[in-house]
Image (cartoon, coloured by chain):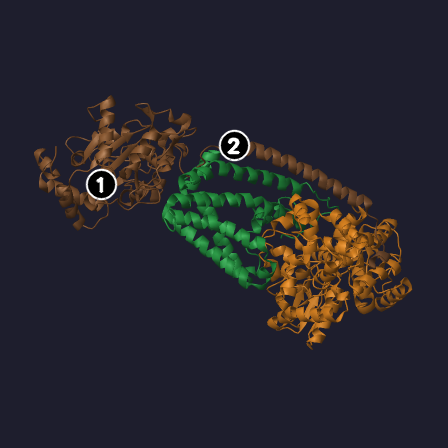
Amino acid sequence: MNELQFLTWVRGPGLDIAVGIFLLGTVWRLFEIYTLGRRKDLAAPRRAAGASGLHTVFRRSLPPHGMLKRAPVSYIGGYIFHIGLAVIVFLGAPHIMLIANLTGLSWPGLPAQFIGLATVMTMAAMLAMLVDRINKPAKRFLSTFEDWFVWAVTFLPVLTGWLAVQHLLLPYTTMLALHILSVEILLIALPFTKLFHVFTLFGSRWHNGSANARKGVPV
Amino acid sequence: MQGPLIESLARQGVSRRTFLKYCATLASMMALPPAAGLAMAEAMAAARRPSVIWLPFQECTGCTESITRSHSPTLEGMIFDMISLDYQETLMAAAGHQAEEALHAAMKANHGKYLLIVDGSIPLGQDGAYSCIGGRSNLEILKEAAQGAAAIIAVGTCAAYGGIPKARPNPTGAVSVSDIVKDKPIVNIPGCPPVPVVMTGVLAHYLTFGSLPDLDDKGRPRAFFGETIHDRCYRRPFYDQGKFAKTFDDKGARRGWCLFELGCKGPVTHNACATAKWNGGTSWPVESGHGCLGCSEPDFWDAGDFYKALSVPAHPPTSVVAASVVGATAGAAAGFANRAKKNAARKARQPITVADLEK
Amino acid sequence: MSASLEKVTQTLKEVIDAPIASYFESCVHCGLCAEACLFYTETGDPKYTPIHKLEPLRRVYEQEFTLLGRLKKLVGLSRPISDDELDQWQELVYDSCTLCGRCSLVCPVGNDIVYMVRKFREGMAVSGHVPEGIRSAAKRTVETGGPMGLKWPAVANVLRKAGEATGVTIPVDQEGADYLVLLSSMEIVNYPEYIEALAKIFNKAKISFTVASDAFEATNAGIQIGSSDLAKVIVSRIVDAAERLKVKYVLSPECGHAYMAIRWEGPNLIGRPFTFEVVHVLELLDELRQKGVLKMKGKLKDPLILHDPCQIVRRGGVLQAPDALIRQVAENYIPIADQQKWNWCCGGGGGASAIHTEEAEALRARVFQIKKRQIEEAGVGTMVTFCANCRITMEEGLDHYEMNTKLLGLTELLAEHLED
């Protein structure tokens, strides 16, 4: 298989497989998790939970009281890499093309140089997070194979995308194919690893927020 | 037309100065040192014409057209004057048995020394019956001709990589020259058709240095195929600024913005179009407003839609509906099983008392 | 699988629900919960990372309710839980978790970690993986009525004395009263002033109240040990008494977990909503203050800080009243940085203060450093709180570090400054 065939494969059958496993896994896991149900809280609420679940979904995106100082790398690094990923995925021209192709939705992107900068910052933040995971006792203690694996699976698409655009290390075609392949691996891994937090995070914050709101505590 | 090249050039009104300039340009395109231009000119001017045999297989004659139909007179055309093109079906006057005799005579006379140029792919299906000349299959002819060749130049994507005949479902079982011949140096000059100057450049190099130019991993001369169309494209700044033509007749298209979104394969295509251009330097596909098709890459025909951007799927994902349905079914089944398990646990459990607190 | 392990998994299967599943699936091992846990911040030992305290529960969830987990168990990638492991985890789930819930406030993916610890304790309790101190407290509460083995005649005696001291007779088993007043053994034995204060305030506000001879104890060791069955037995006594006496309100004492048990867990334990309202004493006092019934005279001049008990404030939702009330009686009240829902635990909640092993006591002393720092940074000699358990725990801490900080109960302090 030459590199163009490789690229054609990842753009065709490879993508089919990855999207298939991703969707199958995601739908199945969401069912598996949320059909477990919860018992109704019979205690009279201090006030109706209302939209508190939603409030918590947003509120938890900000560092809670005093936490920024306690774990600056986690928060600053976390912000940079999450926002960086979003910028790259949603504002990079080739990615907008992909989204437009899949969904029909399209919007203006940012110049390639800006995306390049965002990519470098994202990689730097992810490396800082990795070092933090190695250095911080609690983080290192919690880390399992999955944590290192998921880090790599998230880092690789960013790295290969950047290398492809910058024409580094390997010919563009090969790198582009590797980039798409790495995204496909990410898609496949997502429903079955902690990456699934991209979905369950909303449910978790919601449950926590609404349960505590019944007690009158905004969390 | 025997004798040194320079004389025949002079007869056709090409001055020595023009020829030198041409050689210098060729040398610089091939990334040779400046002095090489002069060496090239001298070598070529004095060159004895080597015998060249051109075999056409499953092809469309586009490659021949490209090289010979450049305008007249062109230096590329002239270069052909310095070789002894002993067999070229399209160009030669002879036909039938006469032609075959000429071929065999040339092969015999120059055994081990002639250059073999091939255009077109070789069909292996039905014992090669898809393409025969004088009752012999292309495969048979190629094997025979390759034996006495000093080197082979596979001209065009068909000869180099199988090309369009090899496109799925490849009904004739087409393969490339390098799939058949393993024991001779082969230079691939892909393109559908290839850029004329690349062809003559390789010949010039062979005549000058008596060797083949430096090749990449796909057997292509690095000098011409070392960079991608995208890297040398004059529209590249628009790509970097994120300015893309969305349709072939929008504002972006009129302003000459990047054609990436219209399916240009420039980023993954190695060829010299952007620098050498076509039709005597007049223009080239991207300049004329159409994206690159990637014709100098293996299997370009099967590399997805010509009009789909590289970053989008080759075709809409087919697994979406099926995967969602299977996922939902499996998930719902798991959900039922889990609920049943929870209920069973609740029913089976005995309320604990203080006595149970002991282990 | 041993019989006790079977009980554990059965119980855990019953308690694991969608929120728990969602929480485990969301965890990204970021370790931020550790930064919110005083057991980690004060010891630096990563085993005290809150989410790690739930590892056996996570595996039961994974192995019982996810297809992948079942596969992993099958091929040996996911170990089944064992008795040894639960033995090891007992320390993490009881000694070093006070159910303070601070971790639930910081988790970036929104996990309610303390909710899971509470559920995990259900499984630990059924298999007897509980510290002796809590076990005996639970036994005493179920068998004799209170965690300290206090019986009614002794309580009646204390009530009578309080009546004499204040000149307000404390009604017992009086049907139709507005409030059924609950007490905690700790208050009855160690801080009878609380009862006197309450009698004075009720009298002043002209609110009718009563104490039930068969349901005076508010604390619920069943909640602390984590057994809903036992907690239900204990809470039912209060519900029965309240319904028999037809009261409108049940008044929870200052005690934090007692409030949690009756206010938030109670209806879920008995499986139906209450026919009465549960009110925390500070909520009542704040209401009286707002109505102008609670009038104060003179103010305490000593600079002081407030310790907000976790179960009342962060997990109970009594957020505003304490601050408003302390300002009524303290001239030099200094709000601290980590206050209200962000306060740090005393280190002895969730039953931890009942564990009297050498290690547990040493650990409590160690984590008390955070309170010590708060006191020292504020530069005060007095700390006010409103939970008898916090008070006992912090007194031990102050003794340990030989500090002469004065600890006061908020209700008592209010009673002292009540206008006659």
Q: Which of A16 and C257 lies nearest the eye of the viewer?
A: A16
* Tags 2 and 1 touching, CB below 8 Å: no
Write down which chain is painted orange.
C
Q: Disc 2 designates what residue?
A: B318
Q: Report if residue B293 is visible in the image.
A: yes
Q: Is residue B297 left or right of residue B1?
A: right
Write down which chain is painted green.
A
- Chain B's shade in the image? brown
User: Could you tell me which chain the residue with mark 2 belongs to?
Assistant: B
Say if C281 sits above or below C361 in the image.
Answer: above
First along the sequence among labels 2 and 1: 1
Dot 2 surroundings within 10 Å: few (below 14), some, or many (20 or more)? some
Using the numbered discs, state the Cα–Cα distance from disc 2 to disc 1 in whole angstroms: 46 Å
Locate residue C206, reporting x and y percent: 80, 57
Q: Disc 1 designates what residue?
A: B201
Query: What element does badge 1 sit on?
Result: helix
- Tell me which corner region of the image, top left, top right, bottom left or bottom right, holds residue B194: top left
Q: Report if residue A48 is visible in the image.
A: no
**Mark 2 or 1, closer to the camera:** 1
